[in-house]
Image: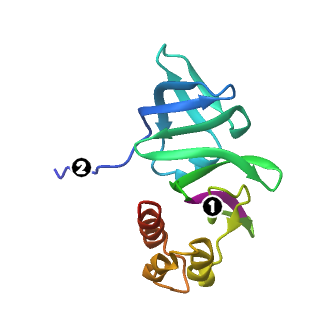
Amino acid sequence: SLITLTANAQITFVKGYLVNEKGDTLKGEVKINPKKEQDNYSKVFFKDESGTQKNYKPNKVKAYGFEKQHYITMDYEGEQKFYKALVRGEISLYKMMFEVTNMNATSYDGEYFVTRKDDKKMTSVKEGKFKKQLQEMMSGASGYANDYEGEKKFNEEKAVDVISDYNNRK
């Protein structure tokens, strides 16, 4: 007989934190499903240190995180959503995922936002013009933006590298 072992990513609890509405940081575990990353943007299932488990929506939590991933509650078109903080600092880059239904088929799409520390307004990333957006935000040190390879498709990894280099330049 032939036995096949497959290492499938499974739903599991990992060490994490949750910042409640009052601003208190609770330590515990976050339930994650690697096959459904989009769930991280709409809810969080958290088990605190006492073992109490609860499902939270973005309107009841300020932030949460696990395994170097951080999610922050912010407004998206009048509704509270979790944004994944890809880079935080003088310039921050966030990702937000949402459900798209097309001809009865559901899929998920991401949108990226960039903001400066001194500006409360988030700017939607324009795929083909991201390098120009960075140059404007990095006034005085826009040479860092030149390291972003201007493809037609947004390159998340390269954007994170360039913004991190800029934020750490001092």
Gap between marks 2 and 1 measured at Cα = 48 Å
Q: Which residues are magenta?
A: 91-100
| Residue that appears at 49% across and 13% down | 50
> In the picture shown, does residue 146 fall above or below 6?
below
The location of residue 154, given as percent across then percent down, is 54, 76
Element under disc 2? loop
Could you classify mark 1 by the number of other residues whose Cα lies within 10 Å: few (under 14), some (14-19), or many (20 or more)?
some
| Residue that appears at 54% across and 52% down | 85
The location of residue 9, given as percent across then percent down, is 37, 47
> In the picture shown, does residue 3 fall above or below 119?
above
From this viewpoint, which residue is outermost toward the left? 1
Q: Kindly identify which numbered label has been placed on residue 116.
A: 1
Q: Which residue is mark 2?
A: 5
Residue 96 included in the magenta stretch of the image? yes
Check disc 1 and give the amino acid type. Arg
The location of residue 67, given as percent across then percent down, is 40, 43
> In the picture shown, does residue 58 fall above or below 136?
above
The location of residue 101, given as percent across then percent down, is 73, 64
